[in-house]
Image (cartoon, rainbow, N blue to C red):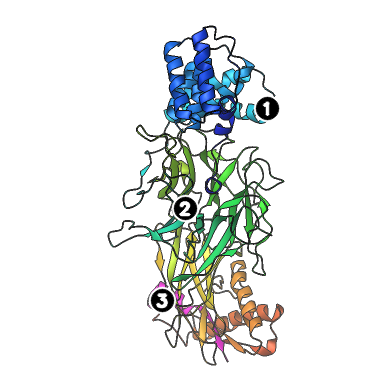
Amino acid sequence: MLPKILLPAGLLLALAATPAAAQAPVPASITDNKARGLYEKAQLLYRRDRQPQQALLVWNQLTEKYPDYGEPYLRKASLLLTLGDQPKALEAYKTGLSKLPVEASHATDYLVLGQLASRVGDYATVRQAYTSYLSLNPTDKKQVANAKIQLQNCDFAAEAMAHPTGAAPTRLPAPLNQYRAQYFPVLTANNRSLVFTLRRNAEQPGRENEDLLISSVDSTGKFGAPKSISPEINSKENEGAATISGDGKTLVFTACDRQGGVGNCDLYLSHLRGSKWSPPRNLGILVNSKQWDGQPSLSADGRTLYFSSNRGGGLGGYDLYVTNIGPDGTWTAPRNLGAPVNTPFDEEAPFIHASGTTLYFASNGLPGLGSSDIFRTELSDKGEWSAPRNLGYPMNTFAREASLFISSDNRRAYYTRTEPPQPGDAPGLPAPIMLYGSEVPASARARETSTYAQGRVFDALTKKPIEAMVQLFDLNSNALTQQVYSDIETGEYTAVLNEGRAYAMYAAAPGYLLKSLNFDYSNRQKFDPLTLDIYLDPAKSGRSAVLNNLFFDSNQAVLKPRSRTELDRLVEFLRQDASLRVEVAGHTDNVGTPAANLSLSQRRAQAVFDYLAKHGVPATRLRAKGYGETKPLAANDTEAHRAQNRRIELRIL
């Protein structure tokens, strides 16, 4: 199960196993009788007597005494690989193949040599191995395609390393990275909580166990000691490759071979209520398949989910898919992202930036520096993904990079790097998997930078926290860009805002007046996080709310197109409670004559009245009234105060 959560990095062991696993005749090229005897003895020790270490001693004896024979080096290399000693296996393959002609019988050995060399960044050997393989005119179309990509990688690596794009990433400091294997880091939108997967007992095959840990920023501004995310989430089974919504309240993770699962690895969902996570729920047969589904990435509002799967009908081994929460609250059937994102090879570890317009993922089917590189692609206004672009060196290296996460403010990157075996590592010990971090170079940043609004929602009278729906709409497109809920116990919410956008924000709860807020980041020089508590007024007679997203030209009463977002929310609000009767109240500042201001306020109120009535709200439930400049909210002494006084209010009758 464990290799399924963190996708396997190739078929190296399977490719290498055949020569060492079978009792093969001694090659005719070995003419010395003593050498032939040692060859047969080594094979018998391995196959018949099940003594691989003794067999290795004999292979060593044979290559030392008869160094001109190439075949014994290859058999020794295959055994070393089976024992988990990749560095020595690489050297043995290089030596053995250098002593032999390029022949079809060694095609598999060239593939293994190329794969081993790519894992340590030996691009010269990679080029030699795959060039030799292709010269044999092999018929395995997938391996041929892979060999051609690896040769492209050699060219790409030379160019990328000659033109680095930023500072080299570094291991995250203690108390993180205290284990042999940890991976898939994800952050909440406020950058204060880091969730990642821990593989316990990674050095003891058969005893590993994966859990989800969380590390929170302490008073010094550094990540504190990791702890289990929740006993509701972690179990004696394996939980890994998680994603968390921007507000930290929705968690989706991968789990395999669970009772009642759909396939061998499925996606599960849990919600945070107060301080407790709900029992995980399988996303069901519509999202999960009978195959492998994992490595999820949630949009900031938790309503769009990207993941990797090897289900049927895809373009390659593992493809990227996306699903959304539909109007009825259920997840839609996943859609394959298609080309140019997916290739005939493997795409994994998707990450959608908080802005929602830039997707990062790992692939071994596109030119890069190693076995798996990280790429970025952007979503156009037409819903199409751009051609993926490699993040370059040193964010990508010959090592296996995956599971990138870039903070909402585009400043910090976090990701997983599988490090090569280290000198002194015991044979067979899994390679260390570490969490890395770096500043984000300009070329790797998401197309849009994001920040967040964070606060609590309260009852305006009792001051008690309430659960409310908080929505963000793009005023220019009238599109819902985010929908989150404040916590039922604490009232806390977090909403993500993108630079260059003008937003209408709405907070709504049953029995309360709609709260309307406005954020315009179209031309802001500073783009900092907001702390904003929201107070909702009960929908009772005499209570009122200012409508902050209705727009008129100066001294005019014609609603501008950007007002449609607010008007449609008002229609929806009034439809939800047919018993409400409301007054649309118009107000102005004191610029101009009182009579002109009274007329203007009445005409503006009437314009809103007319829209509501035209869109299904009975006129008998509505009243339009202008108050002119008679009810200011602030002194008319500055332009900011006068803007405050120019308003439309909704008052419950």
Q: Examine the image and state in which quarter residue 334 appears.
A: bottom right
Amino acid type, mark 3: His
Camera-side residue: 615 or 624? 615
Tell which circle, 3 or 1, labels the residue nearer the N-terminal end.
1
Tell which circle, 3 or 2, labels the residue nearer the N-terminal end.
2
Q: Position of residue 475 (x, y in %)?
A: 57, 65
Q: Are marks 3 and 1 in contact (CB under 8 Å)?
A: no
Q: Secondary structure at mark 1?
A: loop
Decide if residue 152 is on the left or right side of residue 399: right
Circle 2: is it few (<14), some (14-19), or many (20+) Cα within 10 Å?
some
Q: Position of residue 188 (x, y in %)?
A: 44, 60
Amino acid type, mark 1: Asp
Residue at numbered disc 2: 209
Q: Position of residue 628 (x, y in %)?
A: 51, 85
Q: Which residues are magenta?
A: 637-653
Q: Is residue 37 above or below residue 649?
A: above
Distance, label 3 to label 1, CA atoms, is 74 Å
Residue at numbered disc 3: 641
Residue at numbered disc 1: 140
Q: Secondary structure at mark 2?
A: strand
